[in-house]
Image (cartoon, rainbow, N blue to C red):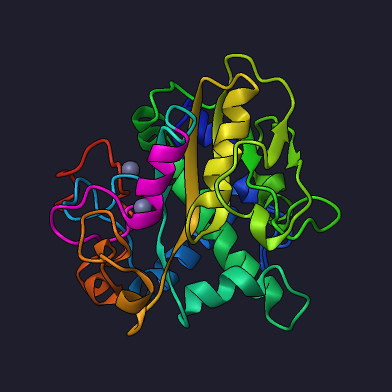
Amino acid sequence: MSGKAGDPAAAAAGRAGHAGGLAGDDGGQLAGWELLTRSVRMQAPFLSAPPPAARGLCAACRIPVRPGNAHCYPCGLHAETLPGLLADVVVPICYAVKGGEHARNLWLYKSARPGAAVAGAALRALLVVFLRDHGPCVWRAAGMTRPSHLAVVPSGRGRAGPHPLRTLIGTCLSLPWAALDLRLRDEPWTRDLDAGRFKAAPLAGASIALLDDTWTTGASAESACAALRLAGARSVAVIVLGRHVSAPEPSASALAPGASAPGSAAACASVNDLPAMPFRPRLCAVHAHAGENGQ
Ligand SMILES: [Zn+2]
Ligand SMILES: [Zn+2]
């Protein structure tokens, strides 16, 4: 068991050994962690992730951006639109490349299709092991000692019942969940950044670990952050299973006049940058001890 005793992240993830539904988990916590870390090791060669202290990444969502740009296009817009209400830090565990296995898992686990349980088990392992190993890095980057609450970005589809991500990992985590729900009826035009899109129960002084499966523009996660802050949350750290990355659109420049300007759509670099950023389970984008572990 490599969980860190007394560590709030370890406390949050400490039940992972009993993560319900793990194939072959015969109840031993050690066996549970071994299964989880083995799953992460098996996925790692096929994943890419933002390295710590990397240059050339969006300061918010960590997608590659062209030199001279601090933010990708959506994150730049969000910073102008809701200053003071956005996340303290956003940490993607991995990139989710369109058409790749990780991106496939991220939609498959929410479906009723064959393979959904296997996809869910892979994602659960990635998230729970990340929380155990890098939770403290994220909390530090967000300016909190530890989260007081967990939350999941509500589904844009307004499906009934708990969010699939909460269902997937709820048995692994021990912190209370913040109540966060859709306020606006979900329509295509309500999916932009909007501080009124979600509503949260009062959370005076709370520190929130806000979990999301996929970050595309970040509008949903940042809208959820805004709702949490308006409910009184002091700090919000967003942890994302997959920061969506797609190949560049040949017609992008035609859709975005002035696209060469900083902060424009062309400020976003492409999937071509990812091979240089392999997923390393020992590191995260905000790793507290970058440079150790021989990396
Ligand atoms: Zn960004
Ligand atoms: Zn870390």
Residue lying at the far right of the rendered structure:
160
Q: Is residue 257 above or below residue 79?
A: below
Question: Residue 233's spot in the image, x, y percent?
Answer: 57, 22
From the viewer's perspective, is 229 left or right of 268? right
Tell me which residue sits at (39%, 39%) in the image.
Answer: 79
Question: Residue 294's spot in the image, x, y percent?
Answer: 14, 52
Residue 177 in sight here: no
| Image quadrant, ligand 2 | top left
Tell me which residue sits at (62%, 72%) in the image.
Answer: 107
Tell me which residue sits at (20%, 52%) in the image.
Answer: 69
Question: Residue 254's spot in the image, x, y percent?
Answer: 33, 78
Count how many numbered circles sit on residues in the image. Answer: 0
Residue 68 in sight here: yes
- Magenta range is 62-82
From the viewer's perspective, is 144 left or right of 250? right
Q: Is residue 227 above or below residue 130?
A: above
Which image quadrant for residue 114? bottom right
Residue lying at the far front of the rendered structure:
257
| In the image, residue 85 lies in the stretch drawn in magenta | no
Residue lying at the far top of the rendered structure:
205
Q: Nearer the viewer, residue 235 or 280?
A: 235
Which image quadrant for residue 274? bottom left
Q: Is residue 104 above or below residue 133?
A: below
From the viewer's perspective, is 90 left or right of 70? right
Q: Nearer the viewer, residue 53 or 136?
A: 53
Q: Nearer the viewer, residue 29 or 65?
A: 65
Question: Residue 131's spot in the image, x, y percent?
Answer: 48, 43
Q: Nearer the viewer, residue 231 or 238?
A: 231
